Amino acid sequence: VYATTTEMPKRQTPGRAGGFVDEMRAVAMKLHTRDQAKEGEKEADSPPVSKWEPSVDGYLRFLVDNKLVYDTLETIVQKAAYPCSHTEAFLLLELEKSWLEGSNPSNAEFRNTGLERSENLVQDLEWFKDQGHTIPEPSVGASYACYLEELSEKNPQAFICHFYNIYFAHSAGGRMIGRKIKLLSCLELLSRRHKLVLRPAPGSDYTPIAPSVWCSVHVAEKILDSKELQFYKWDGDLSQLLQNVRDKLNRVASSWSREEKDHCLEETEKSFKYSGEILRLILS
Ligand code: HEM
């Protein structure tokens, strides 16, 4: 059972859009576990991020599948809306017409929001390739990509739910994960250089490091700092970009009936299911 307008607490947080986005957020926050976010209500079925021991290969799989999902979302919003006058539309090649068929005009609102991740992920994957890593093929993300394609044509409210959760999750929990990965890749680099086996001390989030390698920690940190992944970088003020998208989401949803809104909220669980599968690739 999902929260509806009447059940929603009044949000006081400055910078929030209010409106339907607050409803989407409230449903999403409840689907977090307590260790992921303080508003979370779900039982944890995997270790908290602070206890993760990811590998570079697992993290690469996660990036590749994310890229496929972002490519799909960004192509869907680019092709949205009929481009021109009837005459111009008439002149479109059959191929282009079929490409545009079924696209939802209101998705055009979400073009060039500044939150796009696809190009940034291309750069990150190139960087990993240059470091000698083999870039894997996408795996679980492929079925999510197909599902998003299907929704974009047949189920605009459900599509918007995924759009919101994917971009907003990455700007919040995703960045938290990014910071953790950065620390771990720094340690992995060190352990390879110094032929050490580094494991977190029992009950601690931090890996013990001998004083002799501390100077290298700073070096490694510097290398990784200058190579900070583009996936976690945005051009411009992220909170403003997010706010602009919240406003657009509220505008689009303002024409929806209560049933359509509830339908959108009900899709949140699926969004967590698919994104959760991609997230778990980090630990694979
Ligand atoms: C927000 C953590 C997974 C969707 C947040 C916040 C945190 C967080 C700390 C910020 C809460 C606040 O504003 O006070 C995490 C962690 C995750 C995770 C650690 C996994 C390890 C997910 C997943 C989804 C998701 C799988 C959905 C696909 C969202 C959304 C918000 C959010 C929509 C609201 C963002 C906003 O209002 O700006 N998450 N999350 N999260 N998360 Fe997650």
Image (cartoon, grey):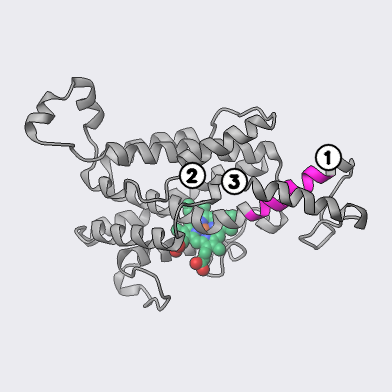
Determine which residue is flagged by label 2. 274
Say whether mark 2 is within 8 Å of ligand 1: yes
Q: Is residue 171 above or below residue 20?
A: above
Q: Considering only order in the chain, which callout, 2 or 1, is on the residue closer to the N terminus?
A: 1
- Quick check: can you spot residue 78? yes
Q: Which mark is residue 192?
A: 1
Q: CA distance from mark 3 to mark 1?
A: 21 Å
Is residue 181 inside the magenta stretch?
yes
Q: Please tell me whether the stretch drawn in magenta is mainly helix, strand or loop.
A: helix
Tell me which amino acid carries mark 3: Leu
Report the span colored magenta: 179-190
Characterize the local packing of mark 3: few (<14), some (14-19) or many (20 or more) Cα atoms within 10 angstroms: some
- Quick check: can you spot residue 32? no
- Image marks 2 and 3: residues in contact by CB distance under 8 Å: no
Tell me which amino acid carries mark 2: Tyr
Residue at the left extreme of this rendering:
87
- Quadrant of the image occupied by residue 139: top right
Is residue 240 inside the magenta stretch?
no
Q: CA distance from mark 1 to mark 2?
A: 34 Å
Q: Is residue 88 above or below residue 124?
A: above
- Give left or right: position of 274 versus 62: left
- Quadrant of the image occupied by residue 201: bottom right
Q: CA distance from mark 2 to mark 3?
A: 23 Å
Q: Residue at x 7, y 30 (%)?
A: 87
- Give left or right: position of 38 versus 207: left
